Image (spheres, grey):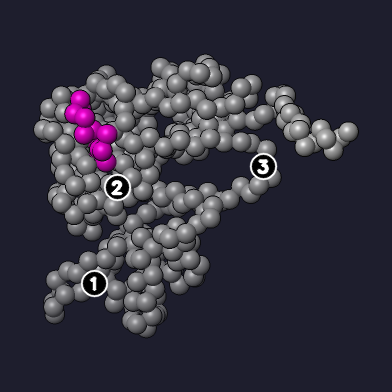
Amino acid sequence: MIGIRHVARKSLHVNASGATGPALDMLKALGSETRIAILQYLGDRVVSVNQIAGDLGLPPSTATMHIVVLEKAGLLHTEMRPASRGLQKVCARTYDELVIALPRGEHHTREAIELAMPIGGYSDFSVEPTCGLARSDGLIGYLDDANTFFEPDRLRAQLLWFRVGFVEYRFPNRVPPGANVLSLQLTAEVCSEAPLHDPDWPSDISVWINGIHLGEWTCPGDFGGVRGRLTPSWWEDKDSQFGVLKRWRVSSAGTSIDGLDLSSVDIDALALRRGDPITIRIGVRSDAQNVGGLNLFGREFGNYPEDLGLRIEYDLAGVPVTEPEPTSEALVRAV
């Protein structure tokens, strides 16, 4: 239901580089003072369309038009509820903040490699129930059976969950020889793992890179009640529906999450070596203060069409440029 209690700020990261489709709809939807006023008016409330129109001094038809645009962009959601006379449409805001990544252009000095890993592509794991795996079209194996995580079909997983433990992934290190790695950024859609769902269910989620613990981030809850934008229709409404998109970044300045300082672990501490894989582990420690489990979402589940993502930024300062060997045609012209 729309009327869930909001206990945390729900963030959406929008990549504005060559924005198309849903991202473009969202940016266009924000280009209206009236629609901004509607989002500001809603806050964390659930309000009928008629009340929005009346309180903002809008004709009902105008309010409805703007609400349709915002709903199409995914910035609010609506449902029909019983009223004193029939049904009325009510609205709630989907997100509390938007983080927009602007295009960098072609003249920035940093190079970057971006890698995507299916959430079922883990190379190691240790999990305890409650736990399970789901594809976009059904469950994998058995519920609350850790052996399910060995199933060959795990590679098709679009949602995995466990109460305590970890999953670990190995990414190839494709940085050119001699390049200087400036930062690593991990992106994942995650939430806690509660019975069914519970917006007030904190869990301390940890990330390790190359065995180095970056720190813990406390997820406030397991989000449901409103269907995830990508959550398949067969998945029951009462269960976890979506997470929050988090970005862990390690640079020379330390580790941050969504731009906020997390720990002093810097890029040198990761001891990256070309030829060695980069291991990424995400999980919940058994000795954490809040052992609230983990849901990890793939590109076909939740709110974000993204797999587990790793971005490696580097520069080529000091790397010698190898001149190409002259072709025979070039030698002839030189003579």
Looking at the image, residue 110 lies above or below residue 100: above
Q: Identify the residue position indicated by label 1 in the image.
A: 89
**Residue type, label 2:** Glu
Could you tell me if residue 42 is visible in this image? no
Looking at the image, residue 63 lies above or below residue 117: below
Q: Answer whether labels 3 and 1 touch (C-beta < 8 Å).
A: no
User: Was residue 204 drawn as part of the magenta stretch in this picture?
Assistant: no
Nearest-to-viewer mark from 3 and 1: 3
Q: Who comes first in sequence, dot 2 or dot 1? A: 1
Residue 107, quarter of picture: top right
**Residue type, label 1:** Lys
**Residue type, label 3:** His
54 left or right, relative to 87: right
Q: Which residues are magenta?
A: 149-162
Could you tell me if residue 62 is visible in this image? yes
Q: Mark number for residue 315?
A: none
Q: Who comes first in sequence, dot 2 or dot 3? A: 3
Q: How many angstroms separate mark 2 from mark 1 (CA)?
A: 28 Å
Q: Identify the residue position indicated by label 3 in the image.
A: 108
The front one of 143 and 5 is 143
Residue drawn where x is 23% and y is 46% of the image: 136
Residue drawn where x is 56% and y is 27% of the image: 175
Q: How many angstroms separate mark 3 from mark 1 (CA)?
A: 47 Å
Q: Who comes first in sequence, dot 3 or dot 1? A: 1
At label 1, counting other C-alpha atoms closer than 10 Å, the crowd grade (few under 14, some 14-19, many 20 or more) is: some
At label 2, counting other C-alpha atoms closer than 10 Å, the crowd grade (few under 14, some 14-19, many 20 or more) is: many
Q: Identify the residue position indicated by label 2 in the image.
A: 300
Residue drawn where x is 88% and y is 33% of the image: 335
Q: Position of residue 241 (x, y in %)?
A: 24, 48
Q: Position of residue 169 (x, y in %)?
A: 36, 26
